[in-house]
Amino acid sequence: MRIGIDLIWVKVGKSGGAESYIRNLLDGFSKYVDKNKIKFILFLSEDNHESFNKYLKDINFKKVILPIKSEKVFYRIIKENLLLDRYAKKEKIDLMFVPVYSKPLMKNKKIPYITTIHDLQALHYPEYFSKIKNIWLRFAWKRCAKTADRIIAISNYVKKDIEDKLGIDSKKISVIYNPISGLENISDFKKLKEKYNIEENKYYYTVSSLLPHKNLKTLLYVIKKIKEEKYNIPNKLVISGVGGKSEPEIKELINKLDIKNEIILTGFISNEERNSLYKNANIFLFPSIFEGFGMPPIEAMYFGTPVITTTKASLYEITKGKAFYVDDPFKIELWIKKILELNNKNEYFCEKFEEYNLIKITNEYFNLFLEIGKKNDL
């Protein structure tokens, strides 16, 4: 079976959790899929194809570059709709996998499509998006869900959202959690210590894009209060991740609160550096109010670092109730109370969630591909 994977949408280092998800999954496809049964054709853009070259060492992978630039989103969407099916036909694709909601809007009667919907955030928080983007997302999600042969939801929360808000039959939706990978290698903390002026177990850590729903402003106020009240706990916060809509506002607030020395914005970093920052943090703080899945808390718990997060959207589901939670994500006092409680605890345990094991998740995708293929007599 020849499986096409649409990766035209990937803006290298800027696509956040969706990019981590698909790169982890490709690692699984490369390592664990039966090479006698499936060949993967990666459909890539002119400005992202080199970042996927490592997979070409595997004879089971082939890349096809379309005359599209992922950075030019408007033109990318148009060209993707015009060209993807044409290129898929040329490559004799049996099944197309689109890891985000950007599949062509028209249904292809000859090639079955599987698409992943990560969340329906704009339907919950339309204020975080422009009017035009709200209109587009509502239309694109609905159209994508209607024309796909199967939808993958990355949590039960997302599945119910798709059923309720898009009116899709539950039988058309498969829940497959995001795979967690890339945690094996770790950078020497000594280099990061010098680079960011931090000490082991004396900083808080979060991995987050600078977007409104990530609720990072609350953490800035938490650090401000810790500094002012002179609590006997760490008062530094390291934030790793790509930029986003709230970046100017976040930087302005850091200056306004006079916490420039307490906040470290690393920008995008390697998995190895991120893992070291996870492992050596005092507490991992994840104040997000909306996640379809949310990989960072799971990754932090893998290293035995205590996690404080919220109970919003999918976060309680994916952390399996094993993190520490604040009921009101915007209440500064609740965050500080929970931090103080954790600083009095002496013992934490590494949580290695088997539900997100790369081999397990890879097999779930593999079986779904075979199921859809059998259904379509491939």
Image (spheres, rainbow, N blue to C red):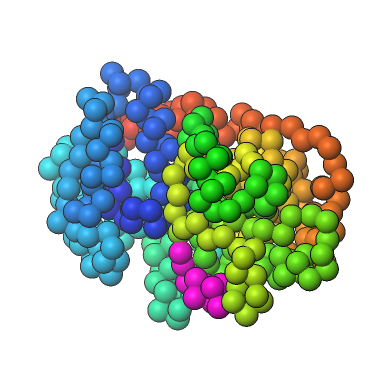
Return the x and y of residue 215 as percentages of the image width and height.
63, 66
Rendered location of residue 293, percent (x, y): 57, 49
Quadrant the C terminus occupies: top left
x, y percent for residue 340: 84, 54
Question: Which quarter of the rendering shows the N terminus?
Answer: top left
Where on the picture, by quarter, is residue 165? bottom right
Residue 133 x/y as whole percent: 42, 74
> Magenta segment, principal secondary structure?
helix
Residue 120 colored magenta? no
Relative to 149, residue 338 above or below: below
Instruction: Identify the image quadrant of residue 251.
Output: bottom right
Tally of numbered tags: 0
Return the residue nearer the eye: 204 or 71: 204
Q: Look at 47% across and 41% down and name the residue there.
A: 271
User: Of 136 and 370, which appears nearest the observer?
Assistant: 136
Task: Note whether residue 139 is visible.
Answer: yes
Q: Is residue 125 visible?
A: no
Residue placed most toward the observer, 124 or 204:
204
- Lateral position of residue 303 relative to residue 137, left or right: right
Residue in the picture at 56% in, 39% down: 189
> In the current view of this chain or complex, which residue is farthest to the left?
90
Q: Is residue 348 above or below residue 325?
A: above
191 or 31: nearer the viewer: 191
Report the residue at 67% width, 52% height from top: 203
Q: Residue at left 64%, top 35%?
A: 303
Q: As drawn, is 87 to the left or to the right of 335?
A: left
Relative horizontal placement of residue 208, taking residue 58 as reference (left or right): right
Tell me the magenta residue range.
243-253
